[in-house]
Image (cartoon, helix red, strand yellow):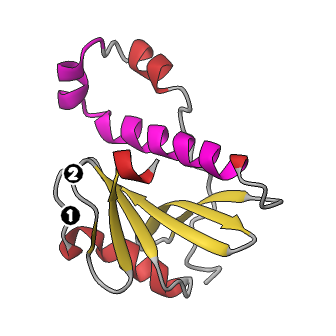
Amino acid sequence: MGKRLVKSHKIYFRDTGLLHYLLNISSVEALRTSPYRGFSFEGFVIEQLKRKYMQEPSGRTGFYFYRTSQGDEIDFLVHDRQGLHAYEIKTSTTIGLGDLKGFKRSLEQLGLRKGTVVYFGREDFQLDRQIEVRTINNLL
């Protein structure tokens, strides 16, 4: 596993309001058409998940990004007393298995039975035995 991992940091902008200001994104329509929309949504979701996990009295919690040299990745990994929790974050309003090939491979590489996809859609559903899809509103 170690030879396939990309050993570099990923930087997140924790304050999406400040990010939008610096990118001169001043309206919902500008955000909707911005090439930075995905980065903004990913940063927002990660910040909200971090807050959620930090409020739970579970002891030490670690937060990670996972990516292999082949490009398989997990946007957000949380390690707490219950184990590893994997999250993939998508700005789309629909999700299919074809959109998640790298995420599925990453789950298998890490030996994880379950992963959660967070998206802009309207309904939560189980995509397959391994992947649960949640709306941002219902996740938080």
Query: Residue 104 in magenta?
Result: no
The residue lying at 43 percent from left, 53 percent from top is 139
Residue 100 place in picture, x, y as percent: 29, 71
> Would residue 36 be found to the left or right of residue 80 on screen?
left
Q: CA distance from mark 1 to mark 2?
A: 8 Å
Q: Which kind of residue does numbered mark 1 sit on?
A: Ile
What secondary structure is the stretch in magenta mostly built from?
helix
Residue 12 place in picture, x, y as percent: 54, 39
Viewer-proximal residue among 51 and 29: 51
Which mark's residue is nearer the viewer, 1 or 2?
Answer: 2
> Would residue 114 be found to the left or right of residue 59 on screen?
left
Residue 93 place in picture, x, y as percent: 18, 51
The magenta stretch spans which residues?
A: 26-54
> Would residue 22 be found to the left or right of residue 62 on screen?
left
Query: Residue under circle 2?
Result: 121
Viewer-proximal residue among 3 and 138: 138
Q: Quadrant of residue 27?
A: top left
The residue lying at 40 percent from left, 82 percent from top is 105
Q: Secondary structure at mark 1?
A: loop
The residue lying at 61 percent from left, 47 percent from top is 52
Q: Is 23 drawn above or below residue 78 in the view shown?
A: above
Task: Name the mark on residue 95.
Answer: 1
Query: Residue 31 in magenta?
Result: yes
Q: Which kind of residue does numbered mark 2 sit on?
A: Gly
Viewer-proximal residue among 2 and 15: 15
Say few, some or many: other residues with alpha carbon within 10 Å of mark 1 (under 14 / 14 to 19 / 20 or more). some
- Circles 1 and 2, Cβ within 8 Å, touching? The answer is yes
The residue lying at 27 percent from left, 47 percent from top is 91
Q: Secondary structure at mark 2?
A: loop
